[in-house]
Amino acid sequence: MNLTKKILIALVLGVIAGIGLTFSSNDFFSAIDTYVLNPVGEIFLNLIMMIVVPIVFVSIVLGTAGLGDPSKLGKIGIKTIGFYLVTTAVALVIGLGVGLILEPGQAGTFDTENASYEEEAAPPIMDTFINIIPENPIEAMSTGNMLQIIAFAVFIGVALAILGEKTSGIHKLFEQANEILIFLVNAIMKTAPYGAFALIASAIGEAGLDALGSMAMYMVAVILALLIHGAVTYSLAIKGLGKASPIKFYKLFFPAMSVAFSTSSSSATLPVSMKMAQERLGVKKSISSFVQPLGATINMDGTAIMQAVATVFIAQVYAEPLGISQMLMVVLTATLASIGTAGVPGVGLIMLAMVLKQVGLPVDGIALIIGVDRLLDMLRTSLNITGDAACAYIISESDKRNEKDQAEQTA
Ligand code: ASP
């Protein structure tokens, strides 16, 4: 049986086991979770997290060196950031639209009296930009600061490209390190079905289904908006800009989506999503290794959708309807918030506080959605990394077309 099938089965079994566990006694769930699900899930998570920093660093160095010309990197960078900003804005508009049509805030009674949310400090967006160049690259790696690691790796890659023959030894060393990391990803992916099963069953069992109740419509709205963005926006972009088949894209990229679903972390999924893009979709390594790590850090369309629906939901619950200018404000601040959101579980909710404050809605409203957020995090993370891969695929396909055209012209 191939890996995709195995992961799919693990996913379905994980959901069934998770739902089954919500009916069991608390003691039974906590015993199973503590001694089986949690250890298996955490070991899998640690295995993939272990190679995230080395793989991002090594592959960006090689990717940048492979592009040769730094101006080419600039062009890819502009296209990538343009794609990320536009798709995030579209995602927000879809989220707002679905929220306004389905009116999840009118779908039940909500206890706003007792809702209170202790706001956590969100990182100031400007700091993210200012600190892109690391003062201490080793610290950036030890703390997993992705943007700083990307910046440092780009510098090394450009230097390797310019120095050429002089540094061919260390270039070779990076290539060999890359071989080792790819070997490790392949080995770790063999354990993915077990890890995914354990993580999913544990997350669903822990979140429980009691929280659903009147939140069902909110969940439906988020899920519907996620589906629309995946099925329409990305498909149109892949077909229109990449001149490629969206069906093929989704079929071949699926294992990465399921790892994102089970880990709820874009960063942890990076090694797998890069592997799927490069090996299965044929995305050029130099493009994938730059576009995808950047996306896992700054591009979060699924998170943006949750934030848009949540803002509309909270506005409806507190009967403070949003005007057009406030909605534009949501698009602007949530796009920025998605850049500042780290690719780890649950951060999207912390950044939501910033969006709510900007439009003058009560931050306490977050308390209402917290109970169902863990489950939605799984889905939105899948969409987050799909957007990154779609961008890499499109840029790579159009690059290949350009090269072909040029070759034909010179022939
Ligand atoms: N878990 C999401 C991610 O890693 C971020 C979030 O929305 O909380 O992409």
Image (cartoon, rainbow, N blue to C red):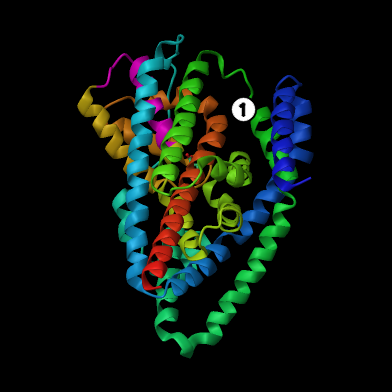
Above or below residue 292? Residue 349 is above
Give the residues in magenta. 303-322
Which amino acid type corresponds to the residue marked 1 in the rendered image? Answer: Ala
What residue lies at 61% left-to-right and 61% top-to-bottom? 51
| Image location (x, y in percent) of residue 394 | 44, 51
**Label 1 residue SS:** helix
| Image location (x, y in percent) of residue 140 | 46, 64
Q: How many marks?
A: 1
308 is within the stretch colored magenta: yes
Above or below residue 34? Residue 272 is below
| Image location (x, y in percent) of residue 1 | 79, 45
Outermost residue on the bottom side: it is 166
Q: Quadrant of residue 170?
A: bottom right
What residue lies at 33% left-to-right and 25% top-to-bottom? 362
Q: Is residue 242 visible?
A: yes
Q: Which residue is mark 1?
A: 207
Above or below residue 327? Residue 346 is below
For label 1, the crowd category at 10 Å Cα-Cα, with few meaning under 14, some 14 to 19 and many 20 or more, is: some
| Image location (x, y in percent) of residue 264 | 57, 41
Majority secondary structure of the magenta segment? helix
Decide which of 389, 219 is in the foreground and name it: 389
What residue lies at 37% left-to-right and 40% top-to-bottom? 88
